[in-house]
Image (spheres, grey):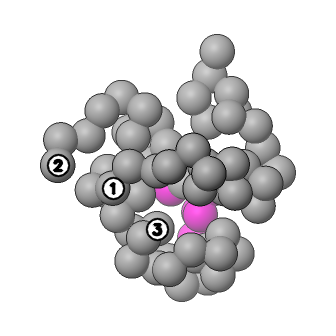
Amino acid sequence: MASNKLDRKLAKFLREKRGDQTFQQFSDKMGLPGSTLHRLETCEQSVTLGKLEDICDRLNCSITDIFGK
């Protein structure tokens, strides 16, 4: 699957937020399976709007924090 600009921005944001945590640690915090987190971070999967809202809630951020204005 070819990634688009928004997928890449989300992937970069998630990798930065994960920092030194393992996929499992961060996926537990995010409420996502580790495999899903991995696919999001490697742009192999796009996020749904509902899941994006969940991610923002869990990370206490806004969509503009991820994608900019």
Q: Which residue lies at the image location 64% right of the left edge and 81% below the top edge?
A: 28
For residue 27, above or below residue 9 = below
Range of residues picked out in magenta: 15-22
Q: Identify the residue under disc 2.
A: 1
Q: CA distance from mark 3 to mark 1?
A: 9 Å
Label disc, if present, on residue 45 of the rendered structure = 1
Q: Nearer the viewer, mark 3 or mark 1?
A: 1
Label disc, if present, on residue 7 of the rendered structure = none
Q: Nearer the viewer, mark 3 or mark 2?
A: 2
- Residue type at mark 1 is Gln
Q: Magenta stretch: residue 19 in it?
A: yes
Q: What secondary structure is found at the residue carrying circle 3?
A: helix
Label 3 with label 2: CB-CB less than 8 Å: no
Q: CA distance from mark 3 to mark 2?
A: 16 Å
Image check: 13 left or right of 55?
A: left
Q: CA distance from mark 1 to mark 2?
A: 8 Å
Q: What secondary structure is found at the residue carrying circle 2?
A: loop
Q: Which residue lies at the image location 18% right of the left edge and 41% below the top edge?
A: 2
Label 1 with label 2: CB-CB less than 8 Å: yes
